[in-house]
Image (cartoon, rainbow, N blue to C red):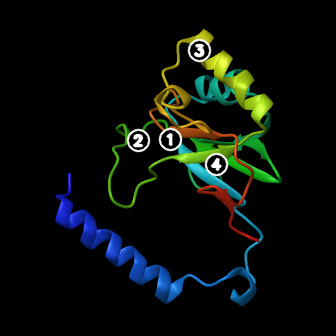
Amino acid sequence: MPTESELVELEARRAELRARYLRPVAEREPTPGRGIHHAALICSDVERTIQFYQGMLGFPLVELVENRDYQGSSHFFFDLGNQTLLGFFDFPGLGLKPGVESIGSVQHIAISVPRDRWEQLRVRLNEAGVPYVGPDQGIAESMYFKDPDGIQVELLSDPLMYFGGRQLDE
């Protein structure tokens, strides 16, 4: 944990970076992107992953094919809404080890769902005994939990482009 003086220095650095790089919406160049097409993650068991993301969370499986870059590996996608996909590979025979949180890795994926659906998913997670951090720990809009391979997922009831109590594109 940083010391109090280090925290002050870190916040001063963030303030400096905001002043240098963060522009009001009216002054920002339009983004050249259309959004994330898909994130590609690695799983250890295709069926268990489908059961979790489609069966537990309700994100429909929309494709399942052989990975074009690695014979015998599967590549499959779930529909996260708003024309966004969550993709997975398995790599049988490679002996991959579980991931760790580290520089350059994904800390979590955040998926926006309407509040009513968020509440339904909270009930499902509770019924399935999936531990999560969220509303009972003071995070009213989010639930953080891990999928069967330890990938951290955040389900949040905030709309897209909303963060810290405000819409970031207005």
Rounded to the nearest whole Å, what is the CA distance between mark 2 and mark 4? 14 Å
Please name the amino acid that badge 3 sits on.
Asn
Kindly identify which numbered label has been placed on residue 126: 3
**Residue 53 pos. (x, y %):** 67, 30
Q: Residue at x 59, y 23 (%)?
A: 48
Left or right: where does residue 113 sit relative to residue 39? right
User: Which numbered disc, 2 or 3, marks the residue that appears first in the sequence?
Assistant: 2
Rounded to the nearest whole Å, what is the CA distance between mark 2 and mark 3? 34 Å
Question: Residue 128 occupies which quadrant of the picture?
Answer: top right
CB under 8 Å between discs 1 and 2:
yes
Please name the amino acid that badge 1 sits on.
Phe
Left or right: where does residue 86 sit relative to residue 107? right
Residue 66 can be seen in this image? no
Residue for badge 2: 94
User: Which numbered disc, 2 or 4, marks the residue that appears first in the sequence?
Assistant: 4
Rounded to the nearest whole Å, what is the CA distance between mark 3 and mark 4? 34 Å
Q: What secondary structure is found at the residue carrying circle 2?
A: loop
Task: Work out whether 18 lies above or below 3.
Answer: below
Q: What secondary structure is found at the residue carrying circle 3?
A: helix
Rounded to the nearest whole Å, what is the CA distance between mark 1 and mark 2? 6 Å
Kindly identify which numbered label has been placed on residue 67: 4
Please name the amino acid that badge 2 sits on.
Leu
User: Which numbered disc, 3 or 4, marks the residue that appears first in the sequence?
Assistant: 4
Number of numbered discs on residues: 4
Q: Quadrant of the C terminus?
A: bottom right
**Residue 31 pos. (x, y %):** 72, 80
Q: Residues within 10 Å of mark 2 (few under 14, many from 20)?
A: few
CB under 8 Å between discs 1 and 4:
no
Taking depth in this image into account, of 114 and 71 the one nearest to the observer is 114
Please name the amino acid that badge 4 sits on.
Asn
Residue for badge 1: 91
Q: Residue at x 52, y 32 (%)?
A: 134
